[in-house]
Image (spheres, helix red, strand yellow):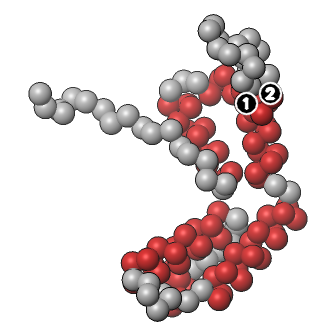
Amino acid sequence: MTSEGRFVQPTIPQFDGHYNHWSMLMENFLRSKEYWNLVETGVTTAAEGADSSETILKKDTANDIWDSLKQKYQGTTRVKRAQLQALRKEFEVLHMKAEESINDYFGRTLIIANKMRIHGEHLEDVVIIEKI
């Protein structure tokens, strides 16, 4: 049996603490499955056979859960600025450890740079290259 004609199933985006990036990926995923309207309009009854004692964040609808995640992880402007400032400091003091491989250091540098960009920092590629 060949894999021709088969579609690769998208994976469900895992929440990693970066709400803006995750929410964009998750919204696209839900729209591709035509489930986004459940988040927008909500579903107030539990699915048949579902354990009603297990509610996510004790919210009644998908919309409530989405808004709760947004409020908790997107944060206020003040929180975002503080997070960005911490990331700037982390980037500034970042250096390669003696036992660290180039690939590991490169990866750590890109992770911090991407987090900074997610938080709104305009970071030129040349700055990242110079850091590496």
Report if the CB atoms under discs 2 and 1 are less than 8 Å apart.
yes
| Vertical relation: 66 (above or below) 50 | below
Q: CA distance from mark 2 to mark 1?
A: 6 Å
Category of crowding for the residue at label 2, using alpha-carbon neighbours closer than 10 angstroms: few (below 14), some (14–19), many (at least 20): some
- Dot 2 corresponds to which residue? 59
Name the amino acid, label 1: Ile
Residue 34 in the image, given as x and y percentages of width and height: 54, 24
Residue 49 in the image, given as x and y percentages of width and height: 62, 9
Which image quadrant is residue 124 in?
bottom right
- Dot 1 corresponds to which residue? 56
Category of crowding for the residue at label 1, using alpha-carbon neighbours closer than 10 angstroms: few (below 14), some (14–19), many (at least 20): few
Residue at 68% from the left image edge and 16% from the top image edge: 51
Residue 85 in the image, given as x and y percentages of width and height: 77, 76
**Residue sitting farthest toward the left:** 1
| Vertical relation: 64 (above or below) 28 | above
Label 2: state its secondary structure. Answer: loop
Front-most of residues 20 and 111: 111
Q: Could one spot residue 104 in this view of the protein?
A: yes
